[in-house]
Image (spheres, rainbow, N blue to C red):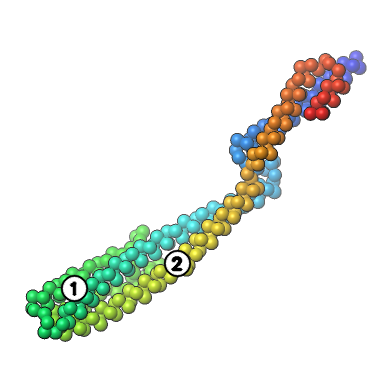
Amino acid sequence: MINSIYNKSSMLSISGSLNASFSRMYESLQKLSSGMKINSATDGPAQLMISERFRSQIATLNQQIENTSMQIGKYNTGSATLSSMRSELTEMRSLAVSAANEGGNSPAAQKAYADSASVLESNFNLTLNRAEYNGAVLFDGSEGSLADLNDLSGVNLSTAESANASLEVIDAKIAEIDAATIEVGSTQKYKLESDISTMRISRQNLVAAESNIRATDYAIEYSNLIKFQIQADAGLALLSHYNMNSQSLLSLFNSR
């Protein structure tokens, strides 16, 4: 009777150990399959809280990076537009210099210069007024625009005298466009691109820190899985032969 009670007690002890081994095997498999050693609060409450805080910061940085990237796109569009308008002004100035050659141009040539300048002036103003990004006007001086630029007017190359006067108008507009180009380029390079670079580095550091907290160490966890499998196999063997000498079998189980 005493021996029977003892064997039953031993079997219950083995069953408890076997259940614990299967539970630990399940935890190891979960960590290996998910790639995370922290899958729930029971795996590490403090670590989970820190990890979630990092994830929140990472999500915020991702949105800020996306917003800044859109701003950079806006400034790229503005820079390209300013470059196009600058080219039109350069061509217009060349025409004005040629048209200002008093006594050297025929009436037909003078008219050709004037007509060409008129087309360039219209194209310049059309480019300026149509410049927008994501529905926002770029150069009307409103909030969020890149600069406050006005239409080009007063260019007249119909005579040498008016062409000379037009050179001053064109040069003034060139100076205005160049100043806007410098402002747009400087803001993009030294503000936006610098900001996005800093945010990307911060995000990279946060991702690495969060990964160190949460990511599974596969070498260690696979070793744990093998150990728990061995313990489970030993427990199953003991249960199938629980009528053998309990003390020697328990010693064998503990040695594992």
- 256 sits to left or right of 209: right
Q: Residues within 10 Å of mark 1 (few under 14, many from 20)?
A: many
Q: Residues within 10 Å of mark 2 (few under 14, many from 20)?
A: few
- Whether residue 243 is situated above or below residue 173 in the rendered picture: above
Q: Which mark is residue 189?
A: 2
Residue at the limit of the structure toward the front, as seen here: 104
Which amino acid type corresponds to the residue marked 2 in the rendered image? Lys
Q: Residue at the location (88% across, 20% down)?
A: 6
x%, y% of residue 245?
86, 17
Q: Residue at the location (40% across, 60% down)?
A: 73
Q: Identify the image quadrant of the C terminus.
A: top right
Tell me the CA gap for discs 1 and 2. 34 Å
Closer-to-camera residue (209/57): 209
Q: Quadrant of residue 4?
A: top right
Choose the circle earlier in sequence order: 1 or 2: 1
- 148 sits to left or right of 68: left
Closer-to-camera residue (230/104): 104
Residue at the limit of the structure toward the right, as seen here: 2
Q: Residue at the location (60% across, 38% down)?
A: 34
Q: Secondary structure at mark 1?
A: helix
Q: Identify the image quadrant of the N terminus.
A: top right
x%, y% of residue 222?
67, 35
Which amino acid type corresponds to the residue marked 1 in the rendered image? Ala
Closer-to-camera residue (130/157): 157
Q: Secondary structure at mark 2?
A: helix
Q: Is residue 33 visible?
A: yes
Q: Quadrant of residue 85?
A: bottom left
Q: Which mark is residue 117?
A: 1
- Whether residue 14 is situated above or below residue 44 in the rendered picture: above
